[in-house]
Image (cartoon, rainbow, N blue to C red):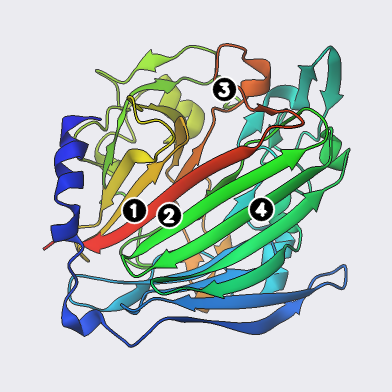
């Protein structure tokens, strides 16, 4: 682990100590209707609360995180994720706000891959490439949802069976994703899947964050630290070239705390390709077995909010909201302008099915896909 992150991790318990003003009673789970899809499927929203007043609202449509209320250093709660007020807005054209992504998070070049001697063709829904599972990925289906309450946490278990051939992928994939909100102010994502035929699997969560509060300006002042010495450069269509490059001496060096806006507009080919940051960082994993390791820390100075990300995944796609352009109107009528949110997508590398040197994303019968990511929320004085 990078020493900066290691020191901050050791201080985490001190950082997350919230004032007594944050406590707003016990936790729980509630369910309410949230409309009907254009296919006639009923959709519900589940509200999860922990003992410190953190409130998470999740749709069974796409596993979408609709809102996340987190206290600032004064104990004031604000929604820190981008999204919409209505189901129709999500169906009409969401840029994956808050959604579960599958079967394959990120891009697959030209919508094609070869597996066990057979070539499979997928939708090309992002220029010449396949993105986030295709035209109707896991973000656009209704999952079976089961809420739970335990002594120190509340949560939601989401299940979806993707049939053989869906969006061009081989095999019937049975996926389970569990969202857990703990009284330690952690939001935990546990991913599990099995298949009856070999298939690529790369599940992730695609919330856009603004730790100052949803709609409260751009995210350029957020201070980011990434536990990554290397990243994967891309071509002009945002497909990795196959190189794994050192971040040293580049605008991609976040090994020490750096504001997102500090170097985002430099004259750099990679930044031009992404219109900012839209790149996979190769995480420094170390000898940790299957336990999550610290991947990122984000601090927002005006509110004092801190979000740390730990994961079992080898990569993290850091996206700085470059394609937000003021055409989307979100919750409470907020207009989402350029770089009003950022995403930290924990995952395997983009285009891994076409890059044998990258960590494999192929799941085979008899194997289990397992992955865990933890968001930890706190405040810094």
The residue that disc 4 covers is 176
Q: CA distance from mark 1 to mark 3?
A: 24 Å
Task: Give me the residue at 58% from left, 67% from top.
Answer: 156
Q: CA distance from mark 2 to mark 4?
A: 27 Å
The residue that disc 3 covers is 236
Q: Are marks 4 and 1 in contact (CB under 8 Å)?
A: no
Is disc 2 surrounded by few (<14), some (14 to 19) or many (20+) residues within 10 Å? many
Q: Residue furthest bottom?
A: 25
Horizontal side of residue 231 vs 367, given as left or right? left
The part of the image, by quadrant, that contains residue 242 is: top right
- Indicate the position of residue 191 as horizontal and vertical percent values: 58, 48
Horizontal side of residue 150 vs 40, given as left or right? left
Instruction: Work out whether residue 207 or residue 372 is closer to the camera in this orientation and state it.
Output: 372
Counting residues from the N terminus, which is met first, the one under dot 2 or under dot 3?
3
Q: In what element is the residue under mark 2?
A: loop
The part of the image, by quadrant, that contains residue 344 is: top left
Counting residues from the N terminus, which is met first, the one under dot 2 or under dot 4?
4
The residue that disc 1 covers is 219
The residue that disc 2 covers is 341
Is disc 4 surrounded by few (<14), some (14 to 19) or many (20+) residues within 10 Å? many
Q: In what element is the residue under mark 4?
A: strand
Q: Are marks 2 and 3 in contact (CB under 8 Å)?
A: no
């Amino acid at each position: 682990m990078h020493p900066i992150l290691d020191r901050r991790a050791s201080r985490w318990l001190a950082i997350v100590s919230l004032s007594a003003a944050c406590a707003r009673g016990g936790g729980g789970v509630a369910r309410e209707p949230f409309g009907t899809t254009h296919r006639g499927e009923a959709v519900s929203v589940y509200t999860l609360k922990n003992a410190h007043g953190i409130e998470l609202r999740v749709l069974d449509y796409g596993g979408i995180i609709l809102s996340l209320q987190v206290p600032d250093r004064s104990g004031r709660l604000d929604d820190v994720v981008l999204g919409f007020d209505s189901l129709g807005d999500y169906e009409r054209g969401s840029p994956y706000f808050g959604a579960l992504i599958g079967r394959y998070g990120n891009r697959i070049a030209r919508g094609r891959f070869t597996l066990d001697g057979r070539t499979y063709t997928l939708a090309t829904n992002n220029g010449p490439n396949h993105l986030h599972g295709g035209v109707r990925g896991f973000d656009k289906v209704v999952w079976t949802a089961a809420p739970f309450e335990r002594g120190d946490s509340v949560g939601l278990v989401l299940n979806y069976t993707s049939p053989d051939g869906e969006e061009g992928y081989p095999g019937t994939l049975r996926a389970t994703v569990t969202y857990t909100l703990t009284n330690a102010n952690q939001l935990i994502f546990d991913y599990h899947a099995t298949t009856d035929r070999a298939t690529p699997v790369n599940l992730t969560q695609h919330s856009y964050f603004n730790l100052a509060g949803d709609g409260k300006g751009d995210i350029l002042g957020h201070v980011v630290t990434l536990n990554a010495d290397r990243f994967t450069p891309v071509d002009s269509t945002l497909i990795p070239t196959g190189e794994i490059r050192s971040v040293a001496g580049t605008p991609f060096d976040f090994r020490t705390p750096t504001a997102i806006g500090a170097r985002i507009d430099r004259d750099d080919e990679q930044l031009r390709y992404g219109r900012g940051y839209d790149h996979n960082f190769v995480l420094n994993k170390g000898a940790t077995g299957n336990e999550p390791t610290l991947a990122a820390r984000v601090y927002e100075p005006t509110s004092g909010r801190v979000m740390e990300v730990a994961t079992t995944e080898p990569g993290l796609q850091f996206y700085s909201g470059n394609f937000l352009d003021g055409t989307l109107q979100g919750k409470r009528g907020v207009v989402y302008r350029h770089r009003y949110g950022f995403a930290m997508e924990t995952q395997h590398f983009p285009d891994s099915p076409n890059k044998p040197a990258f960590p494999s994303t192929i799941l085979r019968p008899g194997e289990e896909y397992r992955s865990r990511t933890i968001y930890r929320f706190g405040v810094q004085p």
